[in-house]
Amino acid sequence: MNMEDLWTLEGLLLDKNNDGVPDGVSLYIDLPDNLYPLGLLDFMVRVGLETTALSFNFFEFTNQKVVMSFEKNETETRASFESGKLHIYYTSEEALSSLLSSIAGTELRENLVKDNAQSSITSISDIWTLSGFGYLQEASPQQHLNINIGCEKWNKQLFKATCNFAARLGLVSTSITLPIAQNKNAEIQFIIQQHNQSFIEVPKENIIQLNGSLDQCANMMEWLANERSWKENGVLGAWENAFHYAHFKNKEETMLEVKWDNPSEIELAEKHLESLANNQIQKVEVYVSEPLEIRSLLKNKWSEKYKNIQEITVRSSFKPGFHWIKEELIHQIPANAKKIKIKVKEHHLENSLELPIRWIQELYPIDAIIENETSISKENVQFELDNQLKHTYEVVTLLDDGTVYHLGSLDVECSKVPYVDGERFAAPTTSCIVFSSETGKAVMHFPSDRERFYQFYLTDFLPQLLDGIGEIKGEKGLTQPLFDQMEVEVWMSEEEERLSVNEERTSPLEALYEDIYFNTLDYFEDLGTKLIGKPYIAVGAVVPIMHVAKGENPRASIKVTKWHQLNKNEVKTKELFFEKNVPTKVRLEVNGHIDLWDIDELLTMWEQTKIDDTTVPNSVLVDYSFRGRPIHVIEKYLPSNEQFDNPLKMTLFKPTVLIECAHHPNEVSSNIAVHRLLERLESNNELLKKINIVAIPLANPDGHYLLKKLTKEHPEWKHHAARYNAVGLEFAHIRYKNTIFGESNVLPELMKRWAPDVVIDNHGIPAHEWVQPFAGYNSPPRFPVSYFIPSAKIYGIGRYSNELGTDVARENLEKIVKDMSEIYETTNIPKQNEYWRSRFRKYGHDWLPEIFPLEVHGNINFYKERIVTPTYSAVSILRYPEWVAADIISEVADEVVYGDVLEECVEAQYLFNLSILQTVSNSNVDMKRNGNTLYRERPLEITIRGEYI
Ligand SMILES: [Zn+2]
């Protein structure tokens, strides 16, 4: 047998779970006493390099496949490998050492893989990190080991422990520089030396020293070889946590508290009616933003009270056209009507934010309401846009005998409200009284309760807020928020009605909530752009809390808490002292200050700092959210049951797919969907023979916590305030930065740990109409396209770099989309997608295709155009175009849904992810080697799917 066969499954490697990937080592080393050949360290590092998992059982005989034995010989040094026996004859320890090194493959070969990442060590807690050995600046599929282990004197225990350590170093590397002993030029120097104290130290970058007596060094080496990061259930580095997470104890401090109250719009309307009490008036139409029951009461009350008015109608000033048709016209539709035509005036007002079709949008979903209440299908309710129309709306119906019957017309009144940029304005429908008499018409405007509050917020409150924030400099507004949290609590008498169509509702207060939330973000984006040429994107948490207070006068209270500038403490473990073989004291450097601590004391401090102790079995705790909630990651791969395994090595042999869920927690389905997927993998792990899966089930626990709070009062609102992190930051923008916002570190850590081929990011869109009267009625102007109603039950977005790896990425995306369309074929998702597509067309795309874009691929909408796809640099495929093969977002209409509708969304997300997993699982992975470098071609080329699993 050839010596190279040693490094195969025929040799000392194992494949216990039959997936063709080495996942263990079966080697017994029968090491004689007083023999310490340094070449055995090279041999061990090579053993580790060849496998994805191993255990430290090299020095106890447990019926291993390969037995390595040594025999002193006078004449020659040579090895033979026959029937599981690796027998080595040697003349001297030195000759033996060289032979072992050469079996490991010491001959220096040019390293052909260019972007091998090399990690560095500046702290003892860097020795084992989530990404292996050392701290990695950037993620890479390759990790190189270049270390020298120096020791003047050995004993058997120390030598064996060092062999184990070497094997583990090899395991976490994809390439190695040999030899790892007597190599003074190595990047990392690991020195074992005699000392009267027992401690490990990192005196300088990339120098690790083990100090102590021979026995103490042996014990420390054993400890080190077996230890893990606290994130992987070890203790390494746990003593630093009280400093890393010192901000959990951040105290709340009020910056600003403001109260607002006002007469109700009903009182304003009454004043106007009162002022005309002496005039004879034929007809009065009052428009107020009030619930139907209040408006009915008012109509009765005013008809009684104002006998000078012949006829009083009280209409809604929120979506007046919609409510007019719903409350008044529907009952007048003749039984033999077969079609309704609604002529709508085109909206054109210079500098106003509304779209030309805003009067069509404001009718949504009237066609479905008509369908529910008459015999006319919604397809037979048609809109006609006309810029010459005399009224805002004219409704005619076509009877089955061909006659055209005029149902009515309506003129809608608007006001003018400046937008937060001070340049554009919104023209929301307004409350008013329209008097008609023989001499003509007169209109008296009075702003609705919502509008008066919003005006106060804009012109009175926001400047106060700016004052409170004070000077904005440095990272403020960019990576550090301007304030901590702002609660905008509002009580108003408004309609709150669930409609008979899908998830639709009439909710002026939800609209106000969205305006407060998004327009505040826009206000600061605009301010930053004007002041420093960059938008302020780190504002603070904006939390609108709305109370429906029927019949009450409007009031509000706003409370803002201060943000205390927090920087991440720089913590390094410089020295670790041992007593009776366990670490007891530590010398820490915190922001440059060095102190000696008792480890027990530090761990007690951490217990007191910690606010959430939730554990999840079989998970990795990658980081804590800003408010101290642990973010667990679940990793699924075919288990090896070995003591140690290495994610990066597993990705070398199989493609890895990373799935991020609940980044925006008000998008409620992905967390449930991914648990369903993980359960399926638990009971049927066929897929895991071909791929590894990494899931972040809840990427944003602080947002999730806020969502729970907000849904108590309004369970079915969209709750966009719960999208971002605890201080209102889109934490995707601060990934790959040194930050205290732990939620933004999770994806970067996993990119380093796994170097995944495919990254999936599960998201959601509103399940019902999204309107903002004070931002142009449509979804907010910050988005280039409209999200006013869902365009699909589920759709996808594919991203790729325009520069590098584009061809492969484009083809990969095409394959993924093709397969996905097929997998949806047998479900009811195509029908649901088609339903929403046709709604989206009717209320948007047919009129303004650029603002309501559709990219249909079979059974799914899939966007690859840059206008929809995010482009910021933290997007995985844009950061790592050389090796990420696909980067995909799902969007499902799940903001915020329950019951059957939630189940539809969960199933759609589940299939979306499963489809990608199946497609990727059929790709060929060809691990290659060049000397002691293992690699594969990246980005992965995803082949056409074979059979479903
Ligand atoms: Zn989202």
Image (tube, rainbow, N blue to C red):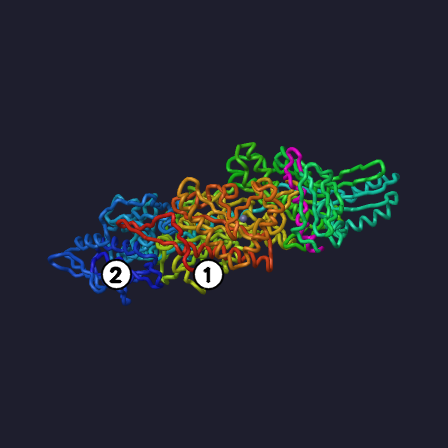
Q: Where residue 781 sits in the image (x, y, percent)?
A: 59, 40
Q: Where residue 768 sits in the image (x, y, percent)?
A: 62, 51
Q: CA distance from mark 1 to mark 2?
A: 35 Å
- Give the residue number, with chain letter if any, for mark 1: 617
In which quadrant is the N terminus drawn?
bottom left
Q: Residue at x 56, y 32 (%)?
A: 530
Q: Residue at x 36, y 57 (%)?
A: 645
In which quadrant is the C terminus drawn?
bottom left
Q: Please name whichever residue, 114 or 472, is drawn nearer the observer in this view of the structure.
A: 114
Residue interval drawn in magenta: 347-374
Mark 2: which amino acid? Answer: Gly
Q: Secondary structure at mark 1?
A: loop
- Give the residue number, with chain letter if any, for mark 2: 11
Within 10 angstroms of label 1, few (less than 14), some, or many (20 or more) residues? few
Mark 1: which amino acid? Answer: Pro
Q: Please name whichever residue, 945 or 210, is drawn nearer the observer in this view of the structure.
A: 945
Q: Residue at x 55, y 34 (%)?
A: 529
Residue 481 falls within the magenta-colored stretch: no
